């Protein structure tokens, strides 16, 4: 299925490589941008990896696409939610290339709340007034 590109549209996209690293970006020409990420002449952060389109969202204006990209880059919960929604596509991409895919390794783990260490008995006796 070919992607129809209207000149008035722009995209926010999520790429994935074989190592499981994801890259988030925005562009007005999705096909050209994916090609440039995979180009030998690429000198940017995505250089040296084969990138696959994991997810894309179309916007009517370029400003909206870049604003959504900025929002996702600032908000890890939204970014991870988009990544989580893309798990079935990621499995297809990894399986197609013979790469083992483990969701537990791919998704960030939830932080455990750290419980403070119990205070020694002498501390409570010395600071009894604080608890009354």
Image: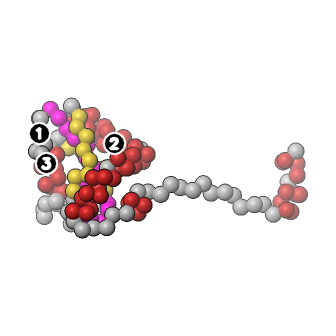
Compared with 31, 8 (above or below) is above
Dots 3, 2 in contact, CB < 8 A: no
Q: Earlier in the sequence, mark 3 or mark 2?
A: 3
Mark 3 = which residue? 31
* Residue 8 is one of the magenta-drawn residues: yes
Between the residue at mark 3 and the residue at mark 2, the CA separation in whole angstroms equals: 21 Å
Foreground: 103 or 130? 103
Neighbor class of circle 1 (other Cα within 10 Å; few <14, some 14-19, many 20+) is: few
Mark 2 = which residue? 70
Mark 1 = which residue? 4
Instruction: Determine whether the residue tagged by mark 1 lies in a helix, strand or loop.
Output: loop
| Residue in view at x 42 percent, y 48 percent | 76
Examine the image and state in which quarter residue 77 appears. top left
Between the residue at mark 2 and the residue at mark 1, the CA separation in whole angstroms equals: 25 Å
Foreground: 49 or 44? 49
Task: Judge whether residue 18 can be spotted in this image.
Answer: yes
Neighbor class of circle 3 (other Cα within 10 Å; few <14, some 14-19, many 20+) is: some
Examine the image and state in which quarter residue 49 appears. bottom left
Mark nearest the camera among 3 and 1 is 1
| Residue in view at x 27 percent, y 52 percent | 89
> What range is drawn magenta here?
7-21
């Amino acid at each position: 299925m070919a992607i129809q590109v209207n000149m008035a549209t722009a995209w926010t996209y999520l790429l994935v490589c074989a190592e499981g690293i994801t890259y988030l970006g925005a562009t007005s020409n999705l096909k050209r941008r994916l090609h440039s990420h995979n180009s030998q002449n690429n000198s940017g952060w995505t250089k040296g990896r084969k990138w696959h389109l994991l997810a894309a969202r179309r916007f009517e204006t370029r400003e909206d696409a870049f604003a959504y990209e900025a929002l996702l880059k600032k908000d890890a919960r939204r970014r991870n939610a988009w990544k989580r929604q893309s798990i079935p596509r990621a499995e297809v991409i990894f399986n197609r290339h013979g790469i083992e895919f483990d969701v537990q390794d791919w998704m960030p783990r939830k932080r455990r709340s750290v419980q403070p260490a119990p205070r020694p008995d002498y501390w409570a006796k010395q600071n009894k007034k604080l608890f009354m």
